[in-house]
Image: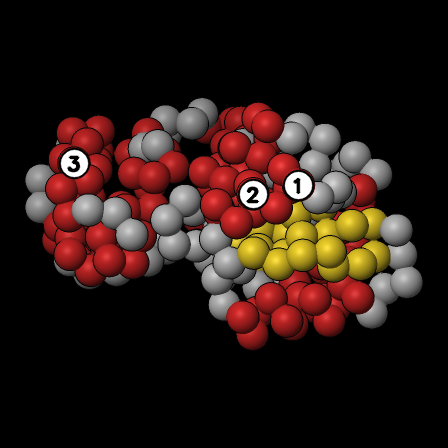
Amino acid sequence: MIRILIADDHTIVRHGLKQIVDAELTMTTVGEAKNGNEVLEFVRKTPIDIVVLDISMPGRNGLETLKDLKREHPSIAVIVLSMHPKDQYAVRVIKAGASGYLTKEDAPEELVSAIKKAFRGEKYISPEVAELLADYIEQGSSETPHKLLSDREYQVFCEIGKGKSITQISEELFLSVKTISTYRTRIMEKTGMTINAEIIRYCVDHNLS
């Protein structure tokens, strides 16, 4: 029996994923978590085979949680689930050790297959993600400015690209205004952009917002 932890900050999403998992005779949901801290606490106490992990959670986000999981529990496979298009986060999560990346639109059709493949120790790579990985290898990681950013910087970058204020972003990510401002400063230094409007235009042009 494949033991699965579902992590998402939306109750209705967790319940939907649980229904998909528990409909399979070879799988069972052994727990749910609504943030990264709960994920790490749960796996320290309960044997888990797979974590289905949302990338956009309050506080410690999915990418940070993924890295902590792979460092502390390398035998646990992680499938990252996101509402963001594959070209925004797929390469980053695969590089960080995820066994697969699915959008929430993909989940009903692909989640079971992804879990079974991850349980066998394999990567679940869709043709679209495979193409993104090939492009990354061919072009290099620093071909475009946003690829120079750390994972948290990239998350803040995308939120600025949606036109959100520093205060809005700090509230959504449960970080201080000062911390978000520091990330913004680093983003400007790394990308060479000087005002938010440049970030917004860049995100629109690169389909990141």
Q: Amino acid at mark 3?
A: Thr
**Element carrying mark 3:** helix
Residue bearing the label numbered 2: 41
Residue depth check, mark 1 versus mark 3: number of the one nearer the observer: 1
Residue 78, quarter of picture? top right
Residue bearing the label numbered 3: 182
Q: CB of mark 2 within 8 Å of CB of mark 1? A: yes
Q: Amino acid at mark 1?
A: Lys
Q: Position of residue 172 (x, y in %)?
A: 29, 58
Q: Work out whether residue 137 or residue 63 is closer to the camera in this orientation and state it.
A: 63
Q: Position of residue 107 (x, y in %)?
A: 65, 63
Q: Quadrant of the C terminus?
A: bottom left
Q: Is residue 45 left or right of residue 3?
A: left
Q: Is residue 202 visible?
A: no
Report, in whole angstroms, how far the alpha carbon at label 2 lies from the one at label 1: 7 Å
Q: Residue at x 16, y 29 (%)?
A: 189
Closer to the chain start, of discs 1 and 3, is: 1
Residue 49, quarter of picture? top right
Q: Residues within 10 Å of mark 2 (few under 14, many from 20)?
A: few
